[in-house]
Image (tube, rainbow, N blue to C red):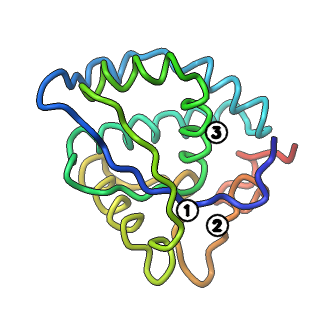
Amino acid sequence: MKSSAIKPCLMAAAVGDSGADLRSLRTWDLSPIARRVERELGWSWKFVLRVEREYRHFIALAVLEPADRLGMQGPVDEFWHRHILFTQDYHRFCHAVAGGYIHHSPHEAETHAGGGSYQRTLALLERRFGKVDEAVWPRIGANSCNNCASCDKVGERDVLTRA
């Protein structure tokens, strides 16, 4: 499956007051999802591992910043979509890591006209985890390509391969 355009998504974290455990996030086996992403999107294994790391960062934000609506776009969104398809694992993952279900609420409007919640997510990622990997988290702007799953124009040309 190859996406011709990645639809930006927002997420609202429904995180319970108790039960959040970021240690589970660090150790959760995401290899079945990573293998599926590699196979379906034709990304190099090295790039898939970078995306998986950033997916973990995104989920950590959902736990650490539960009041914020976090914007999603690009390769991490593709990884998240595949994880959701593993419904039982995703359900257990959410409850183990966040103490509640992390909902996916797709919206397109906020990524236009400055990026809204997506830009806020990038700022939070940078504040919590350091420099944002722009090949994994594409910047929104007049000169940026937001079609990351369908081309190799994402920073390092040797990272993604065409399917």
Q: Which residue is mark 1?
A: 138
Query: How many angstroms separate mark 3 from mark 2 (CA)?
Result: 17 Å
In the picture, measured across the screen, residue 133 lies left or right of residue 3, that is left
Residue 136 appears at what percent x and percent y?
A: 55, 51
Query: Which residue of the protein is positioned furthest toward the right in this rendering?
Result: 163
Query: How many angstroms separate mark 1 from mark 3 (CA)?
Result: 14 Å
**Quadrant (top left/top right/bottom left/bottom right) for the C terminus:** top right
In the picture, measured across the screen, residue 64 lies left or right of residue 118, that is left
Tell me the amino acid under the disc marked 2: Asn
Which picture quadrant has residue 54?
Answer: top left
How busy is the neighbourhood of tag 1: few (under 14 within 10 Å), some, or many (20 plus)? Answer: many
Residue 89 appears at what percent x and percent y?
A: 49, 17
In the picture, measured across the screen, residue 105 lies left or right of residue 42, that is left
Q: Nearer the viewer, residue 65 or 26?
A: 65
Q: Which residue is mark 3?
A: 47
Looking at the image, is mark 1 or mark 2 earlier in the sequence?
A: 1
Looking at the image, is mark 3 or mark 2 earlier in the sequence?
A: 3
* Marks 1,2: beta carbons within 8 A: yes
Query: How many angstroms separate mark 1 from mark 2 (CA)?
Result: 6 Å
* Marks 1,3: beta carbons within 8 A: no
How busy is the neighbourhood of tag 3: few (under 14 within 10 Å), some, or many (20 plus)? Answer: some
Tell me the amino acid under the disc marked 3: Phe
* Marks 3,2: beta carbons within 8 A: no
Q: Which residue is mark 2?
A: 146
Residue 53 appears at what percent x and percent y?
A: 46, 35
Circle nearer the viewer, 3 or 2: 2
